[in-house]
Structure formats: structure tokens, C-alpha cells
Amino acid sequence: MRLELTRRGDYAIRAVIALGRAETGAVIPAPRLAAITGVPRRFVAQVMVEMVRVGIVEAKVGRLGGYRLSRDPRSITLLEVVEAVEGDPRRRVCVLRSAPCLWDGPCDVHQVFAAAQDALLAELGRATIAELAAGGVTQAPPAT
């Protein structure tokens, strides 16, 4: 089983975390953001378009232009960033049948994979950009 982000997802996460590390309200020019994150310059604007569209990032144009977070980084979740560039991460195809699982009833492993998906989405939804920018997120306590 593979769980991977696209390059766009990777770049978006890196860029938003870098903006979360910036001084509050600071505008970071695209070339500087590329240098900080290691994202190729040509992709910074492409990825930021999606972040601006969903209201996570604000773009400032002009000679002193660049990007900054449009919200408090404590209110932005990793799930929001992922969904902005990757779309809805919920699995729609059965892992056994390569078709929707509920056409003729759930498959034998449906509940296990649904629970794993729910746990992953909950963890992504719990992790904030502020926590990640500060050096990481503490693990959620194990389910009892």
C-alpha cells in the first residue's frame, strides 16, 4: 500500500510551513520562498495559487510583493493544505475490487481501511501549521 503526496502537495506543505515560520505579517518574495524551501522557483507561484484560492495564503503584488499567511498558523491544519492541492483525500475505490466498495455491500476489509483512513485524516486535521513550523507535532494519545 502506498501513501504518497504529489510534488505539488509536498511543495505546498513546505511553502506554508515556511510562511508559518516567518514573522507575523511578513511578506516573503517568491524567490526567497523558493530558496528557503528548496521548491523550484517556477513552482512556487503555481502552488501558491491554490493556497490563495482557499484563503490560507495572501499574495501581495508589486516590487515588495510576495506571500504571507492570511490566517493565524494555529488555525491552519495540514489537512487543509493537503486538500487544497490534492483534493479530497478520502478513498473512493475499494482496495480489493477496484470499484466503489458499497455497490453490492462492503468488502471484507472495508471497516479496517475506513478506520485507518479516518485516523489518518484526523491526524492531518489535528496538526497545525504553527506546530509544524515550531518543530513538530506531538503524537495523539493511542486510542483506548
Image (cartoon, rainbow, N blue to C red):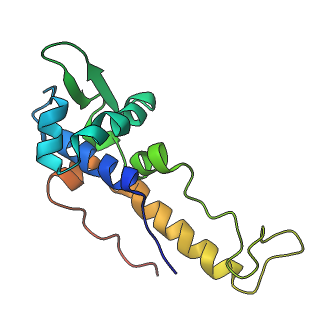
- Measuring from the top left, give residue 75's x and y in whole percent: 33, 40
Q: Is residue 50 left or right of residue 99?
A: left
Instruction: Pick the residue in front: 76 or 36.
Output: 36
Q: Residue at x 80, y 77 (%)?
A: 106
Find residue 141 and report its image quarter.
bottom left
- Measuring from the top left, give residue 70's x and y in whole percent: 30, 27
Q: Residue at x 27, y 39 (%)?
A: 42
Instruction: Pick the residue in front: 30 or 96.
Output: 30
The residue at the far right in this view is: 104
Q: Is residue 128 visible?
A: no
The residue at the far front in this view is: 42
- Measuring from the top left, give residue 17's x and y in whole percent: 23, 47
Instruction: Pick the residue in front: 135 or 88.
Output: 88
Is residue 142 positioned above or below 102 on the image?
Answer: below
Is residue 61 positioned above or below 110 on the image?
Answer: above
Q: Residue at x 34, y 42 (%)?
A: 76
- Measuring from the top left, give residue 35's x and y in whole percent: 11, 44
Q: Is residue 115 visible?
A: yes
The residue at the far top in this view is: 62
Q: Residue at x 70, y 68 (%)?
A: 93
Is residue 66 positioned above or below 72 on the image?
Answer: above
The residue at the far bottom in this view is: 108
Q: How many marks?
A: 0
